[in-house]
Amino acid sequence: MQFRTAPTAVHSFSLICSAGRRHCEYSQIDKGLGHPRKALAYLLAVKPETIARWIETACSRLTVQAPDCFDRVLGLGKDNSGYMFAISGNIVEDMGLPDHFKNYFFRNAMTSAFQEGVNGSTTRAPDDQQQRIALLPNDAVIAIPSGMIRFWRTSPEEFHRRFPQSGAPTDVKNPTSRQTWLTVAQKEILDALGSGQNRLLEANLCARAQDLFHRSCRPPE
């Protein structure tokens, strides 16, 4: 199998990372504030060839191959996450209006709330507050609004349906299911880094295969 290449992370903010810790700070002038809006995040560095291998492997699960599968799945990841995998910290979202941004904290590549009034706020969070929240344990998460994990948009229900023996919950409506999904997602991405298979992507692709390609997927291996 010949692997194609996938892009590295794309983001409109200037990004400075410490290679050892993958501790990143990024900023952009916010004219509404009159000074740079600064954010802190811990990102997982994933090699482009690893992402390409994941896509090739997921596409191979289709019962009949779709010639455009790689390119379409590649584009879906870029449109959803820009190929950023935020382990923890604040990803400042460009809301589509000039100089209009909001804070969103992440955990294991999912938008996660740690305290009321922070996610979605347009006020620059102090550096010490961002650092404190970024280092909170998983059990400090009080909400995972969508439950979907990047790079693509894999829901716990999709993953449970494809891999019922994984222990994944079907939703994140209570503390137990949230903690379970955070743990499962972390294990899956770590496993994927050491192999050519990303089951999170496979579950998402197979859930959408009919809509995207008029195909179904073979049973999981």
Image (cartoon, helix red, strand yellow):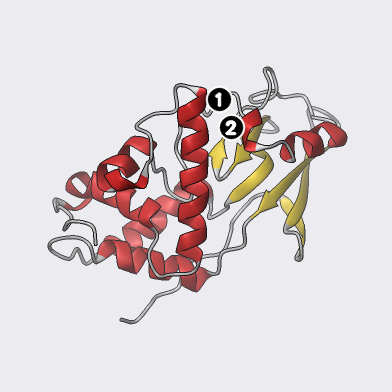
User: At 34% across and 63% down in the image, what residue appears?
Assistant: 71
- Residue that numbered label 2 is attached to: 112
The quadrant in which residue 129 appears is top right
For the image, the number of numbered tags is 2
Q: Quadrant of the N terminus?
A: bottom left
- Residue that numbered label 1 is attached to: 143
User: At 69% across and 18% down in the image, what residue appears?
Assistant: 117
Callout 2: SS: loop
Front position in the image: 200 or 52: 200
Vertical placement of 6 versus 96: above or below?
below
Asked whether, in this view, residue 35 is left or right of residue 1, the answer is right
Q: Amino acid at mark 2?
A: Ser
Mark 1 packing: few (<14 Cα in 10 Å), some, or many (20+)? some
Asked whether, in this view, residue 42 is left or right of residue 109, the answer is right
Callout 1: SS: loop
Residue 60: horizontal and vertical position, in percent? 24, 66
Among the two numbered marks 2 and 1 on one chain, the one whose residue lies closer to the N terminus: 2
Mark 2 packing: few (<14 Cα in 10 Å), some, or many (20+)? many
Residue 99: horizontal and vertical position, in percent? 70, 33
Residue 22: horizontal and vertical position, in percent? 72, 59
Q: Amino acid at mark 1?
A: Ala
Front position in the image: 69 or 131: 131
Asked whether, in this view, residue 55 is left or right of residue 30, the answer is left
What's the distance in space between the residues labelled 2 and 1, CA to CA?
Answer: 6 Å
Q: Quadrant of the C terminus?
A: bottom left
Q: Are marks 2 and 1 in contact (CB under 8 Å)?
A: yes
